[in-house]
Image (cartoon, rainbow, N blue to C red):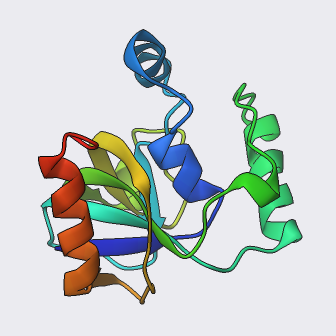
Amino acid sequence: MKALSVRQPWAWLIVRPDLAGAARAAALAACDMKDIENRTWPTRLRGRFLIHASKGMTRAEYDDVEGFLDYFDIDIALPGQEKLHRGGIIGAATLTDCIPSAKRTSRWHMEGQFGFRLEEVKPVPFVECKGALQFFDVPDDVATQLRQMHELGVIA
């Protein structure tokens, strides 16, 4: 299975493990879930993939995301920097489109970037995994762990 590394706290904003049920549906309707992942490169990949939270995150990166939320008046309280999972799989999503910057339709889509449209995003229990650039194949042991969690009903 493919995965994409995303730096924290952006990965958390995509997965939003703090939301379930009606609260999750309301956040989706209010565009309070990051529905676009921004990249400088396009992709032809479509379909289900895993969201990997990168291991590295600086205080400045965390502060930049808080500044982004404030600037765009997005009322989301990030968990503390120390509470964010890093260096592993934290969710799954379906990539449905790659949108050029000129056709931006989401407040999460940055100027000058390709926007990967994300749908059907689900958090999964953290599974440690080394990341890589671009889309990468997860190691067999990680895929097996995730499959077992799915079979046990831990993840949908």
Query: Residue 15, position in %: x, y?
Result: 46, 45
Query: Residue 24, position in %: x, y?
Result: 44, 22
Query: Residue 110, position in %: x, y?
Result: 55, 56
Q: Can residue 6 be seen in this view?
A: yes
Residue drawn at (81%, 49%), measured in percent from left and top? 80
Left or right: residue 61 versus residue 39 is right
Residue drawn at (30%, 50%), measured in percent from left and top? 117
Towards the viewer: 114 or 25: 25
Left or right: residue 60 versus residue 39 is right
Left or right: residue 103 versus residue 110 is left
Query: Residue 147, position in %: x, y?
Result: 16, 61
Residue drawn at (26%, 68%), measured in percent from left and top? 145
Towards the viewer: 20 or 9: 20
Q: Residue furthest front?
A: 152
Residue drawn at (41%, 10%), measured in percent from left and top? 22
Quadrant into which the N terminus falls? bottom left
Residue 122 sits above or below residue 102 on the image? above
Quadrant into which the C terminus falls? top left
Report the number of numbered marks.
0
Q: Is residue 43 visible?
A: no
